[in-house]
Amino acid sequence: MTQPLSALPNLLLGTYTPRLDDKGRLILPAKFRTQLATGLVMTRGQEHCLYLLPLDEFQRMYDKISRASINSKQARDYMRVLMSGASQEVPDKQGRISIPPLLRKYADLERDLAVIGAGTRVEVWDLAAWEEYLANTEGAYSDTDGEVLPEISF
């Protein structure tokens, strides 16, 4: 039996469009603050966004990645890129976090942002990049079938 969403308090959902302030800080959307209040790890995401992961989720992710063979170049490369850009942050009382210059440059973040809940993580995108990504990907979303996601059916 499927749990109702109310029984999944750590699920991060929704899209928000805040702005970076002049000091490179992001005010986290109120809906995400509880899950991220005790701290988070910010790192490079795929498609040039940033991932904000609650500490326990980052630990789970790291544990899985660290089991990969050190003999695998792809695993080493992934670990290096992920970890070299990682920054542990704790939001201030206003829910703000600083985005390090390295990560702002990686994700091309200047002012207008899209902050999206992606289940177990938050993604931070340049707003124009997010809108372009979404426009280019919505068709593929509609075309996704049971072979790609066999457990999903509507």
Image (tube, rainbow, N blue to C red):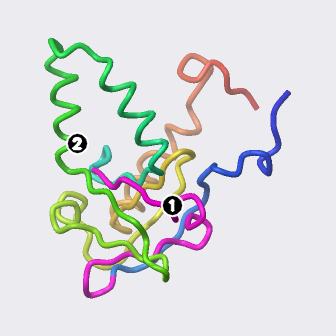
Which residue is situated farthest in the right direction here?
Answer: 1
In this rendering, position of residue 66 left or right of residue 71: right
**Which residue type carries mark 2?**
Met
Q: Which residue range is magenta in the image?
A: 21-43
Q: Residue furthest front?
A: 38
Above or below, comparing residue 100 to residue 57 in the picture: below
Quadrant of res 77:
top left
Q: Is residue 90 magenta?
A: no
Label 1, label 2: how many angstroms apart (C-alpha)?
19 Å
Q: Residues within 10 Å of mark 2 (few under 14, many from 20)?
A: some
Residue furthest out toward the bottom = 22
Mark 1 Cα-neighbour bin, 10 Å: few <14, some 14–19, many ≥20 = many
Decide which of tag 1 and tag 2 comes sooner along the chain: 1
Where does residue 80 sit, x and y in percent of width and height? 16, 36
Which residue in the protein does label 1 denote? Answer: 36
Kind of residue at disc 1: Leu
- Disc 2: which residue: 83
- Would residue 43 appear left or right of 57 to someone viewing this image? left
Residue 143 at x, y percent in the picture: 56, 32
Q: Residue placed at 63% from the left, 49% from the top? A: 11
